[in-house]
Structure formats: structure tokens, C-alpha cells
Image (cartoon, rainbow, N blue to C red):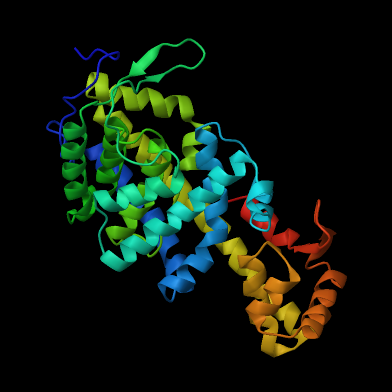
Amino acid sequence: MIDPTKPYNQVPSLPPARFVFDDVELLKASMSAMSAISSLNATIRADISNISHSIHMMSPLFVPEAVTSSGVENIITTNERVYEARLLDENELRIQDKEVMRYVQALEVGLIELTEKNFLATNQFLKIQETLEPSKMGFRKLPGTQLSNPATGQVYYTPPDSGRTILSLLKNFEEYFNASSPSHEVLARAAILHYQFEAIHPFYDGNGRTGRILLPLYLTAQGLLDGPLLFVSKFILENRDEYYRLLRGVTFEDNWQDWVMYVLRGIELQSKYTLDVLRRINFFKAKLEKKLEKLTGHSYARDIAHFLYEHPYFTQVEFEQALQVSYVTARKYLAILVKDKIAAKKKQANRNRFIYVCPEYIKLLKNS
């Protein structure tokens, strides 16, 4: 019997000893989720040409994920606040905005590391966490960490407190993470890996967010996705009580089945949801390009459409630099965008300058 108030230094290594990958209901759920992922990835693949373009294309969608994943940890802000925060000085940022902006950076760090190395190991997990929590970075070396109900103080779980045990479990975790998986096991393994990372709880802070970042990176590493644009944070936030209940069910009842089925359901639903968002964004991009061709001429239409998507909030200087146009030319194009309500111009709070907002893109990204 596991005592939730005592360090669980006996976390079993992977793979789980009594998990049945060939369970019929599990295979059906995996096939359904795989079909949804395949449809999503076809759209992602059409938009990605290289790692640099990949990050630019994905980063606006990273923001809603960062806001939602942080919301699971009760770090509350909005997409719009984060888009605008990028234009502020460090001393003007709220703590919540800094946290969420670091989440976006951590996603990018993970993607770059995976692309350059073609694997993620303990050092890369640490880089992601250090980006999330620069003031609390590093693996736990001291006892005392417990997961509890903040209102009642009830302790739900005490993770391993031995530094040697933590590193040993992480070594096993990285081997399982990087092992080539049979196609029918990939999604179940993703769920297993997510549980294991949360059970190890290797850091003083940022464990949940690091674990949620690693899940789409694992699917990318296994070749299911060309880029980590499948996020389950929205599903988890909407089903948070079930999420924590099922995590505890694995620990205290060895109930892997319900946990894995929960994650598969989240993966399928979020694949379909993200595909719908991407289709709407791509439709709007194409429609906007045609409109811009009539307004600005063919040469800059596509560049402006892509710039607006990548910069829902922006300054004139950014616009000039991205399109490599003069101040006068930028002013001319921006006046056209404002006149036709493609962009809105507003005075930036506490600043003697104006910024521009693309409300239609913000609306689309907000729904993601």
C-alpha cells in the first residue's frame, strides 16, 4: 500500500509490467485517434518547409496553448495580453504574462532541440524546464515536495525525494521516450510517458507544463506530427478533476487502462479541434491574400498576410523590417490596412506610440 504522505521512491520503471497494449477497446481508441492525427498532420505538413519557417508558422498557435496550459496551474492571463506583452519592456510585464511567454519560448526550445538532435534526453528536458522556471531551475535534490489540496492541505502524492532515484528514473524515461515504438502503441506510450513524468516530478516547479510540452514533442519524434501543434491542455483544463483522479488511479490502483483511454480521447478531440482551427486560418489567409492583391498589388500581398498572422500585435518598425520597406511605404500600406479594417491602430498604454492589431487573426487564434 502506497502512503501518499511518504516519498514514492519505488516508482516502477517503464514499460509498465501489467499494461496490455493489445486490448481491443484500446486498439479501437488508438485507431480512431491516429486517424484524427493523420488528418491534422496533412495540414501541418503543407505549411512547414523548414525549422525556421516552422517556428514562425506555429508560434501564434503556441500562445493559446501556453495560456491554457498555464491555466491548468492557475496562472491566469489572456491570449491578447500575451500577444501585446511581446511589445512591452520587462518592467512592464505582469508575472502571469512572463510565465506564459516563457512557456512559448520553452515550446520553441523543445522543437529546436528535437530538430537538431533528433532525440530528447534528460539535458533537453532540463533546458525546457529552465526556460519555464529560470529562478527555480534544476532537478530536485532536497526532500519536502508534496502535491496537496491547497484548500484543505490534504496530501495526494509525495514524489521520489532521492536525487539518485530521480536521475535513474529519468534515464529510463528518456530511453522509453526515444525508443522507436510500434505504430499501434505510440499513443498509449505517449499517455504512459506523461504519467511517468508527473510521477517522477523531477523539478521543484514547472513539472506539469514541462510534461505537457513533451507530449506533442514525443508525437513529433515518433513521426506522427511534422510539428508539435497537437496540445491536450485545453482538454485537460476542461476535464481537470478527471485528469488528476486518473493520474492518482495509476499510482494507487495500477489503473493504466482508464488513464490511457482518457489521454487517447483527449488526443483525438484536440486533433479534430486543431485541424478545424488550422483550416479556418488557412482559409482566412487565402482570402486575405486575394484582398491584399487588389489593395496593395501582387508583390507584397502574401508577405503582408503572413506577417499579420505571425504578428497579431505589431509596431510599424516591425512591419518595415519584416517586409524590408521604407518608413513611407510602410505608412502607405498600414493606412490601407486600417482603412479596410484588416488592422486596427491604437495608442499603446503608457507609451508615446501606436501599435497595430489584426482582430480577425486574433479571433481565429483565440478559438484555438
Q: Please name whichever residue, 140 or 198, is drawn nearer the observer in this view of the structure.
A: 140
Residue 157 location (% of width, % of height): 32, 20
Residue 265 location (% of width, % of height): 40, 40
Q: Quadrant of residue 332?
A: bottom right
Give me the residue at 32% from left, 47% from top: 126
Q: Please name whichever residue, 144 or 7, is drawn nearer the observer in this view of the structure.
A: 144
User: Image quadrant for the N terminus?
Assistant: top left
Q: Is residue 19 visible?
A: no
Q: Is residue 120 left or right of residue 270?
A: left
The answer to whether 196 is drawn above or below residue 252 in the figure is: below
The answer to whether 271 is drawn above or below residue 236 in the figure is: below
Q: Is residue 220 left or right of residue 353?
A: left
The answer to whether 14 is drawn above or below residue 153 in the figure is: below
The answer to whether 318 is drawn above or below residue 150 in the figure is: below
Q: Please name whichever residue, 225 or 333, is drawn nearer the observer in this view of the structure.
A: 333
Q: Is residue 267 left or right of residue 78?
A: left
Q: Quadrant of residue 321?
A: bottom right
Residue 127 location (% of width, % of height): 35, 51
Q: Quadrant of residue 354?
A: bottom right
Residue situated furthest right in the rendering:
339
Give me the residue at 61% from left, 44% from top: 97
